[in-house]
C-alpha cells in the first residue's frame, strides 16, 4: 500500500487522512501536543478560550454533508445570535444573525477530535512531532520497488530516541501554512514558487477572563482589519460553556497585527485593552486572567493564485503535495475544500 505522510492535524490534514485512509497507509505528523490546528482552544483554569477560529461557515454541500451528524448531535450550533459592528465613539450597531455560522460545543477543538474518533480511530498519529526536513530516501524507493522517489521525513519527536524518529513515506503532503510548507518541502517541487507567492497576515489574540458574567449585550463584535480590535467573541455565549464567568477572545485586526508583529507584547496588550474600553466600555482592570497569543501565520491575505478550480498544489513525479486554507482564503470551510479536492485528485494516483 502507498504510504502517505500528512503533515498537520488541522481541518485540511484530518480531511485528507479521512478520504485517503481506505486506499493508503497514512501517518499524520503534528508538531503540537494536540490536534485541531488553528481551530484551537486554550484552557486557563477556570477559563476556556477558543483563541483561534471562533466559528465556521457551512455553505458548501460536501462540507455540510460531512458535518451533518455533528449538527444533529448538537456538537455544532448556530452562533453568533447577537452580532454587532463596533463603531468609534458610538454604540455598537446590531447586525443580522448569521444563519450559516456555527460554533463548536464545549471547546473549538472538539470538532476535529470527534472527526478523528469517528473516521480515524486507528490512525497512526504522531503528536508533538515536528517535521524539520524532507529528503530523498533511496531505500524507500527500493522498498516501493520502483524508480520513483521515496521520502525521509526528519522529525523532532520529543518522545522518540533520535535515530528512531525519522519517518519514511512514498508521498508527503503538507497542510502547514504556506510559509511553513515552503520552508519544509524541497525546493525542487514544481509548485515551490507558488508557495512563496502566498502572503499571510499574523494576528494578536488577547484573552480576558472575568470572575463574573458580564452583561455585554452581544455575543460577537466585528471591528476593522487595520485596528487593534478586529473581532471579539464572548465564549460564555457559545454552547456548553461556563455560564458563570465571562471569557473574551479579542483578535486584533490582521493588518494591524502584521504591522505590530515585532512590537513589545506589553505595548500590544495595552493598545488592545485601551481600544476595548473605548469601543465597549469593558474594563480589563477587572479581569483576573489576561493572556496574549501571537499567531505568526493566522490568515492568508493573498491566497494561492488561480486556485478556484484546483485548490491545492501537487507534483506527481516527486510525489509531493500541499493543501490548506491558504489555497482559498482563511476559513475552516476552505481548509476542508482544499483538503477534500486534493484527496479526490490523489485517489486515482495511489
Ligand atoms: C486568530 C484566528 C482566528 C480565526 N478565525 C476564524 C473564524 O472565525 N472562522 C473561520 O472559518 N476561520 C477562522 N480562522 C482560520 C481557520 O482557523 C483556518 O482557516 C483553519 O483552521 C485552517 O486549517 P488548516 O488545516 O488549513 O491549517 P491549520 O489548522 O493551521 O493546521 C496545520 C497544522 O500543521 C501543523 N504543523 C505546521 N508545521 C508543522 C511541522 N513542521 N510539523 C508538524 N506539524 C506542523 C500545525 O501545528 C497545525 O496543527 C482563524 C484563524 C486564526 C489564527
Image: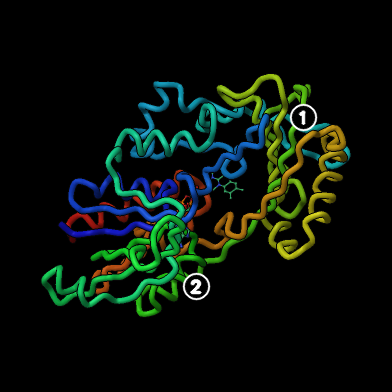
Label 2 sits on a secondary structure element that is helix
Question: Quadrant where the C terminus lies?
Answer: bottom left
* First reached walking from the N terminus: tag 1 or tag 2: 2
Residue in front for this viewpoint, 140 or 108: 140
* CA neighbours of label 2 inside 10 A, class few (<14), some (14 to 19), many (20+): some
Residue 132 sits in quarter = bottom left
- Disc sitting over residue 210 in the figure: 1
Residue 85, given in percent of the width and then of the height, sits at 73, 37
Residue 151: mark in rendering: none
- Residue positioned most to the bottom: 188
Location of residue 53 (image quadrant) = top right
Q: Which of 326 and 166 is in front in this view?
A: 166
Q: Residue at x 69, y 46 (%)?
A: 251
Q: Please give left or right for residue 230 compared with residue 100 in the image.
A: right
Left of 138 or right of it: where is 158? right
Locate residue 343, reporting x and y percent.
Answer: 28, 53
Residue 317 vertical position relative to residue 67 in the rendered view, above or below: below
Look at the numbered disc 1 and give the secondary structure of its residue: strand
Which residue is found at the position 51% from the left and 67% from the top?
A: 179
Q: Which residue is drawn at 64% across and 23% down?
A: 242
Q: Position of residue 145 (x, y in %)?
A: 11, 71
Q: Is residue 42 above or below residue 295?
A: above
- Proximity of marks 1 and 2: CB atoms separated by less than 8 Å: no
Q: Mark 2 points at which residue?
A: 196
Q: Label 1: few (<14), some or many (≥20) within 10 Å?
A: many
Q: How far apart are labels 1 and 2 at the CA level?
A: 42 Å
Amino acid at each position: 500500500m502507498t504510504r502517505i505522510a500528512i503533515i498537520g492535524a488541522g481541518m485540511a490534514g484530518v480531511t485528507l487522512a479521512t478520504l485517503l485512509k481506505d486506499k493508503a497507509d497514512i501517518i499524520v505528523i503534528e508538531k503540537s501536543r494536540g490536534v485541531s490546528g488553528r481551530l484551537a482552544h486554550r484552557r486557563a483554569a477556570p477559563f476556556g478560550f477558543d483563541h483561534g477560529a471562533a466559528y465556521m461557515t457551512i455553505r458548501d454541500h460536501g462540507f455540510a454533508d460531512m458535518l451533518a451528524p455533528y449538527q444533529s448531535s448538537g456538537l455544532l450550533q448556530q452562533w453568533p445570535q447577537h452580532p454587532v459592528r463596533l463603531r468609534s465613539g458610538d454604540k455598537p450597531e446590531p447586525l443580522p444573525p448569521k444563519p450559516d455560522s456555527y460554533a463548536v460545543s464545549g471547546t473549538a477543538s472538539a470538532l476535529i477530535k470527534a472527526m478523528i474518533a469517528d473516521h480515524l480511530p486507528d490512525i497512526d498519529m504522531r503528536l508533538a512531532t515536528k517535521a524539520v526536513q524532507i529528503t530523498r530516501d533511496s531505500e524507500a524507493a527500493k522498498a516501493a520497488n520502483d524508480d520513483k522517489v521515496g521520502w525521509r521525513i526528519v522529525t523532532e519527536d520529543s518522545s522518540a530516541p533520535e535515530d528512531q524518529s525519522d519517518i519514511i513515506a512514498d508521498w508527503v503532503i503538507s497542510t502547514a501554512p504556506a510559509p511553513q510548507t515552503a520552508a519544509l518541502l524541497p525546493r525542487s517541487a514544481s509548485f515551490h514558487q507558488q508557495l512563496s507567492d502566498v502572503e499571510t497576515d499574523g494576528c494578536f489574540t488577547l484573552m480576558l477572563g472575568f470572575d463574573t458574567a458580564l452583561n455585554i449585550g452581544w455575543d460577537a463584535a466585528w471591528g476593522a482589519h487595520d485596528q487593534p480590535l478586529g473581532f471579539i467573541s464572548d465564549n460564555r455565549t457559545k454552547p456548553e460553556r461556563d455560564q458563570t464567568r465571562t471569557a473574551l477572545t479579542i483578535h486584533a485586526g490582521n493588518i494591524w497585527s502584521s504591522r505590530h508583529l515585532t512590537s513589545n507584547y506589553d505595548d500590544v496588550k495595552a493598545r488592545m485593552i485601551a481600544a476595548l474600553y473605548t469601543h465597549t466600555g469593558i474594563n480589563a482592570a477587572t479581569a483576573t486572567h489576561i493572556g496574549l497569543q501571537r499567531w505568526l501565520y493566522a490568515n492568508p491575505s493573498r491566497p494561492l493564485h488561480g486556485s478556484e478550480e484546483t485548490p491545492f498544489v501537487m507534483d506527481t513525479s516527486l510525489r509531493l503535495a500541499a493543501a490548506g486554507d491558504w489555497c482559498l482564503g482563511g476559513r475552516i470551510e476552505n481548509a476542508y475544500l482544499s483538503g477534500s479536492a486534493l484527496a479526490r485528485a490523489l485517489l486515482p494516483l495511489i
